[in-house]
Amino acid sequence: MAGDGEEMKMDMSPMIDLVFLLLIFFMVSSHMIVTKIDKEVKPPTASAAAVAQNIGGRIVVNIHQDGTFYGPEITMKFPNADAVSEYVDAERQKNDEMRVKSRLHLRADKRVATRYIKEIVKAGADALVVDVIFGTYVVEKD
């Protein structure tokens, strides 16, 4: 209690402690989402392309110009579309466990033959992933 002529003071220590505890909680419970980009793949440009807001649940498959298939890392080379289907299926099952919708993120070189793209889309469908995102570069709109 403050007497006559004295100001009441509030102890801010518990409030500061709470803010720091919340900050630590959110830092520990969250995780960084990192998307690795294969520099060998040069996607086409599109004026109607949009930057994605949600990258959760994406299963990235890269197609190089020569028709070789890679996962999100250059060290993850797939010998054929069946291996891609197995990879997509395994990733879909992980996403299903986390209750995240799986989407195939297809990053194909702009010079790749269409038949390779069709193979990967079919491999994704065989793995029960029918939502496909085609990677493009966003160009400035006039």
Image (cartoon, helix red, strand yellow):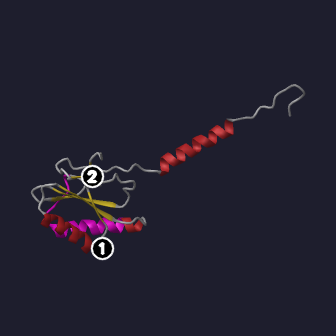
Of badges 1 and 2, the one in the foreground is 2
**Within-10-Å neighbours for mark 1: few <14, some 14–19, many 20+:** some
Residue 94: where, in percent of width, then height?
36, 65
Mainly helix, strand or loop, the magenta region?
A: helix
Residue 67: where, in percent of width, then height?
11, 60
User: Mark 1: which secondary structure?
Assistant: loop
Q: Horizontally, is 60 left or right of 5 in the view?
A: left
Which residue type does callout 1 highlight? Leu
Sequence-first tag of 1 and 2: 2
Magenta run includes residue 60: no
**Residue corresponding to mark 2:** 47
Q: CA distance from mark 1 to mark 2?
A: 30 Å
Residue 62: where, in percent of width, then height?
20, 57
Q: Nearer the viewer, residue 93 or 49?
A: 49
Which residue type does callout 2 highlight? Ser
Q: Horizontally, is 68 left or right of 20 in the view?
A: left
Residue 15: where, in percent of width, then height?
66, 40
Question: Where is 14 relative to 134, above or below?
Answer: above
**Residue corresponding to mark 1:** 128
Q: Horizontally, is 97 left or right of 7 in the view?
A: left
Residue span colored magenta: 74-94
Q: Nearer the viewer, residue 3 or 108?
A: 108
- Residue at image position (33%, 53%) is 50
Which quadrant: the C terminus? top left
- Residue at image position (69%, 35%) is 12
